[in-house]
Image: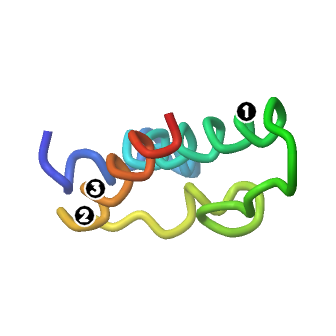
Amino acid sequence: MDARQLAERSVPPSTLSLLGLLRHLGEVERDWRNWISQGEPEGRIYGPPGSEFDIERPDDAQVSQALVVLHREQ
C-alpha cells in the first residue's frame, strides 16, 4: 500500500486508518514496556491519548517513521 492508502480513513466520521493503527501499535508497545519495566516510564510518542490518529497525512516519511517507531518499541 502507498502512503495515501495507509492514511485514508475507513468510514467518516471515524478517525481510523491503517497508518493511525500503526502509530497506535507503537504507543501500545511503549505502554506495555513501561508497565513491565522498572524505573521512570518513557513519555508518549505522539502526544496525549488518541493523538496517534490525529495528524496522519499521505506522506511516505510519516509512514516510514511509524514503522521505525513500531520496530524500536517492539
**Residue highlighted by disc 2:** 58
| Residue 44 position by quadrant | bottom right
User: Does label 3 or label 2 sit earlier along the sequence?
Assistant: 2
Does residue 8 show up?
Answer: no
**Residue highlighted by disc 1:** 32
Q: Rounded to the nearest whole Å, what is the CA distance between mark 3 and mark 1? A: 22 Å
Front residue of 21/45: it is 45
- The total number of labels drawn is 3
Residue 58 in picture, x, y percent from top left: 25, 63
- Is residue 15 toward the left or the right of residue 36 in the image? left
**The N terminus appears in which quarter of the rendering?**
top left
Q: Amino acid at mark 1?
A: Trp
Q: Rounded to the nearest whole Å, what is the CA distance between mark 3 and mark 2? A: 8 Å
| Residue 38 position by quadrant | top right
Front residue of 9/30: it is 30
Q: Rounded to the nearest whole Å, what is the CA distance between mark 2 and mark 1? A: 28 Å
Q: Secondary structure at mark 1?
A: helix
- Residue at position x 38%, y 47% in the image: 19
Residue 45 in picture, x, y percent from top left: 61, 62
